[in-house]
Image (cartoon, helix red, strand yellow):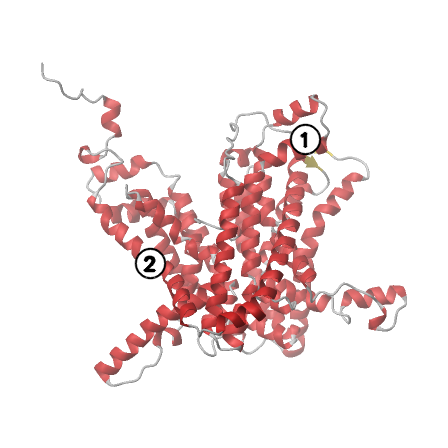
Amino acid sequence: MARGRPAASGSESVARAPGGRPPGARDASALPWLIASGLVVLAVLAPFGGLVFYALRGSGDLWPHLVGTILPQAIGTTALLLAGVGIAVSVMGVGLAWLVANYRFPGRRMLEWALLLPLAVPSYIVAYAYLDVLHPLGPVQSTLRMLLGISSPRGLWFPEIRSLGGAIFVLSFILYPYVYLPARALFLMQSPAMVEVARTLGRSRTAVFFKVALPLARPAVAIGASLALMEALNDIGASEFLGVRTLTVAIYTTWVTRSSIEGASQIALVMLALVMALVILERRGRRRQRYVARSARARTAVPTAIVGWRAPLATLVASLPIVIGFAVPASYLVYHAGLRVAEGGIPPALAGWVLNTVTAAAGATVVAIALGLLVAYTGRFARHAAAPVLVRLSGLGYAVPGTVLAAGMLMPFATLDNAIADAMRALTGARVGLVLSGLGVVLIAGYVIRFLGVATGGIEAGLAKISPSLDMAARSLGCRPARTVWRIHVPLIRPAIAAAALLVFVDCMKELALTLLLRPLGFETLATTVYAEAARGTYEDGSVAALMIVLVGLGPVILLARTSFRDGPAGARRRGASSTTAAAVTAGELPAV
């Protein structure tokens, strides 16, 4: 009797892809997608090669000068800044998340989403506002002197905002939502039975929090704190305004002020090593910590009502970060923008700033969404070991500060610009100069590389909700992958694409470091205008541009509030761990690194 394979059952035949191949088999039609995604990833990695090129090209005495004069202070200041911000955002984010997730007090329903509002205001705008608000002649110190009967501005001691402590204060009250949102999601997902068991064993509420709830929420806290530290490391405007010499500021001044791209590249490599160390620490912090969310049908925890004088105190505690991180700077901008418009009218150059900002951001958004769709669908469709690696590498640009990325982009794009100029001169005899840099193509490319992970992550999350059976059905009907994407997937994930596009657009609009370093000569955006006016000390003149950035920045915050707080605690449990990912992607994420 001949032996052979047993006949496949009906369920096994359904599991096979059209043509008799199992779903995991490699498909030749995936090769073009893999090649195209590989080229995208090569473009993302090109700036890192540029960094190494310029760093090695520096003269022999440059590195000892950096080590002896610049790097020790910059590294020490950066480390202290990150330590202060990391502790502050973790304490605030976890504390606020535990408060709104487990207790009921006046205004809780409004405050739980309003705590996201500081995300709408870029750090350089908050620093810009507080420099004037807390100035010796500003409203806060003037009011205090009036109440205390002090006439001289020097007669009142007040903490100096232009300091390392001031930078930690400003950045912490902007970045705490990175920890608050995923921690709140994890607290809502935790079973109330664990808390009840701990209470029956005689543990106090404080002990339950530190011994049970907080350890279970540690992965979310690690992710959120890492994202906040990445944002603090990327900051250039707030740090420079407040007189804090971080590595990011050192790269900018070495490049722009000292005209040394080689020195800036060497500092950037040191900063890149620090970024990688943060990523490794975040991964190690979540190692061997895998928790399974309870079922959506499980019993819902009932928030404990706070009574007596503690109820208004809880409301005050939850309101304070909103007031400091959003209400004060937003009110300042509204007031001074109104004064500026009333006294001098709308700035004549405002239309140009808006046009430049929208043009660059919209162009980058279109390209990023198209490339993100390509990479995300490759990760879904191509049954190849390289596919998930390409998806992860495509988001590497977001993990790198803008100054580092800008320094690395100069070499590959300068080479390409020179090649185009040489070719045009050989063909036509005309000298066209640096076409890509002059037309803003380099700036748009920088935006795309920086925020491609945002687009890929959002689209990938949308594709994950589509059943693979639709792909198999399309293939059985002879539909090619490109047609499947356009006719089936794009209509189904249109909301995810729109959300990702909104996030990329606003991130490009608010990005300061890349814009300052890669913009064409004379190209002013809303962000660079705010920076220039603050550097000159003319805060009122930049308030209109700053207010427009904040108003547009409210879009992603409203979107995040609608998706994260929809359906209350039950919705958070149904979405499960994806709430943490959504928080990361929306807030400025570490998408695929």
Residue 568 makes an appearance in the image: no
Decide if residue 178 is in sight here.
yes
Q: Residues within 10 Å of mark 2 (few under 14, many from 20)?
A: some
Hey, which residue is sitting farthest top in the picture? 1
Answer above or below: position of 423 versus 384.
Answer: below
Counting residues from the N terminus, which is met first, the one under dot 2 or under dot 1? 2
Instruction: Give the label on residue 208, or none.
Output: 1
Above or below residue 401? Residue 440 is below
User: Marks 2/1: CA distance?
Assistant: 49 Å
Q: Quadrant of residue 542?
A: bottom right
Secondary element at image label 1: helix
Q: Position of residue 1 (x, y in %)?
A: 9, 13
Q: State the residue at coordinates (49%, 77%).
A: 259
Residue 30: horizontal and vertical position, in percent?
Answer: 24, 46
Provide residue 433's location: percent of width, then percent of height: 34, 81
Amino acid on which disc 1 is placed: Val
